[in-house]
Image (cartoon, grey):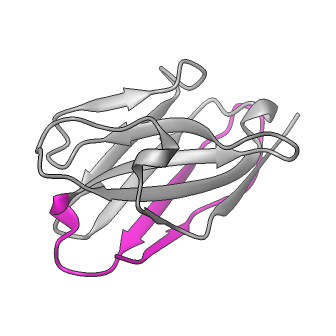
Amino acid sequence: VQLQASGGGLVQAGGSLRLSCAASGRTFSSYAMGWFRQAPGKEREFVAAISRSAGSIGYADSVKGRFTISRDNAKNTVYLQMNSLKPEDTAVYYCAARESYYTSGYYSNSGAYDYWGQGTQVTVSS
């Protein structure tokens, strides 16, 4: 599967952005999806993940209550709605996919994912 992330940009603190990740192929519903981010000089970190059926969702503590992950299997797309953005959210955001036999269950470990998008830059100014 090929992943194309979009929706990044420059926003003021307190603002919102919605990231999208479009997947190629016809088996998108077979993949658990995740969002990760990497700030300059830091390691890639988990942001949010969603199971194949969207029945299971997980978030990093740093984004709980502010970010929402969702998916539309008919459109082969996963989204990350980001509200109340903070300067510390500045990073390159990557979407990732893992083919999963289980309809429930999500993955917060980057090593669990097989496919990665190219990343989209999010910059939050103070």
Q: Is residue 1 above or below residue 38?
A: below
Reply above or below: 68 against 53.
above
**Is residue 14 rendered magenta in the image?**
yes
Residue at the (37%, 58%) spot, across then down: 97
Q: Position of residue 90 (x, y in %)?
A: 77, 43
| Residue at the front extreme of this rendering | 111
* Foreground pick, 111 / 63: 111
Residue 59: where, in percent of width, then height?
44, 27
Instruction: Name, please, the residue furthest toward the bottom.
Output: 25
Side of 87 where 116 appears, left or right: left
Question: Which quadrant is the C terminus positioned in?
Answer: top right
Most foreground residue, 81 or 94: 94
Q: Which residue occupies 14% across, 37% down?
A: 104
- Residue 2 percent location from the top left of the image: 41, 78
Q: Is residue 53 left or right of residue 122?
A: left
Residue 69 left/right relative to 81: left
Residue located 30% across and 32% down the image: 57
Count of numbered circles on the image: 0
Range drawn in magenta: 1-30
User: Per the image, is 7 magenta?
Assistant: yes
Above or below, comparing residue 88 to residue 18 in the picture:
above
In this orientation, which residue lies closer to the viewer: 87 or 2? 2
> Residue placed at 63% from the left, 64% from the top?
119
Q: Position of residue 86 (x, y in %)?
A: 74, 30
- The N terminus - image quarter: bottom left
Residue 45, placed above or below residue 112: above
